[in-house]
Amino acid sequence: MAADLFGPAHGPAGVEPLSAGTFLLHGFAEAQAPALLEALGHILAQSPLRHLITPGGQRMSVAMSNCGPLGWVSDRSGYRYQASDPETGQPWPPMPDVLRDLARSAATLAGFPDFAPDACLINRYAPGTRLSLHQDRDERDLSAPIVSVSLGLPAVFLFGGLTRSDPVRQLTLYHGDVLVWGGPDRLRFHGVKPLAEGIHSLLGAQRINLTFRRAA
Ligand code: MD3
Ligand code: FE
């Protein structure tokens, strides 16, 4: 079979444009998932997943960690990127090549060559976990795209407009799907509906999302 040339067995890793600056790469990370999970295990042993507190004092239901030179954190004083893990006082674990290379090749396929992420935010969703509608605007260089990799249970992703009250499209993201968004879509509002119960063959009762960013 030509699976090596054309991607995972369920079909080619097609690049589906969702709008002018947003591209869905169906199943693009699927073949690499075991290697990604192996790398993630080492990262999370050093910088464990934790529930951050929002500036408003709420505990986030998504559990988070980071790898790479910078990591996204939230606490009572605000949202920011920083070089050390506030939990351990140590630098965030390095970004493994297998993660960085995947993000770079996805960005290139979507028309953003030379993407050089300096932060990878790791989000862990258990059933019932949601992420409310927000914009990603803590990054200095908004000309760089963001690349997102979905692993484990499927999630309904909310894809809004440039203002909070714009209509919101819903899109299911499956294990191995990669989203790249930038350009005119970089500041779109987005979120994730509460994760449905389920058991994924590799990850069990959870979804992990990696977002690669150029933060500095
Ligand atoms: C398309 N994470 O970490 S990633 C986040 O699934 C975050 O964990 C979500 O939002 C998650 O900040 C969604 C995919 C994504 C994010 C933002 C977008 C796709 C987007 C903005 C515009 C268009
Ligand atoms: Fe976001």
Image (cartoon, grey):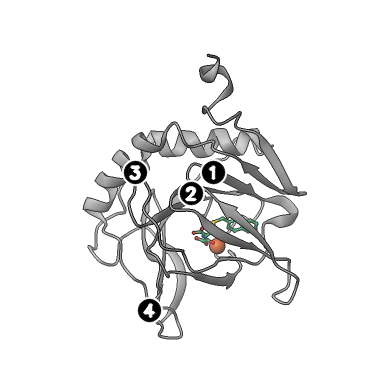
Q: Of tags 3 and 4, which is closer to the observer?
A: 3
* 184 sits left or right of 69 in the view: right
**SS assignment at label 4:** loop
In primary-sequence order, the first of circles 3 and 2 is 2
Q: Up-down: is 106 above or below 131?
A: above
Q: Which amino acid type is shown beneath numbered disc 1?
A: Asp
Which residue matches tag 3?
A: 202
Of 9 and 55, the residue lying toward us: 9
Q: Residue at 28%, 48% (x, y): give it.
A: 43
**Mark 2 packing: few (<14 Cα in 10 Å), some, or many (20+)?**
many
Q: Position of residue 28 (x, y in %)?
A: 54, 35
> Where is residue 62 drawn, in percent x and y?
40, 67
Q: CA distance from mark 4 to mark 1?
A: 28 Å
Q: Amino acid at mark 2?
A: Ser
Give the x, y percent position of residue 183: 72, 51
Residue occupied by mark 4: 59
Which numbered disc covers residue 177? 1
* Residue for badge 2: 150
Instruction: Verify CB contact (< 8 Å) between mark 2 and mark 1.
Output: yes
Q: Compared with residue 162, is residue 44 higher up or lower down, i.e. above or below?
A: above
Q: SS of the residue at dot 3?
A: loop
> Which-is-in-front pick, marks 4 and 2?
2
Q: Is residue 14 left or right of residue 121?
A: right
- Ligand 2 falls in quadrant: bottom right
Image quarter of residue 109: top right
Residue placed farthest to the bottom in the image?
Answer: 56
Q: Given the image, on which type of amino acid does mark 3 rest? A: Leu
Q: Nearest the camera: 179 or 13?
A: 13
Q: Residues within 10 Å of mark 3 (few under 14, many from 20)?
A: some
Q: Is mark 2 within 8 Å of ligand 1?
A: yes
Which secondary structure lies at badge 1? loop
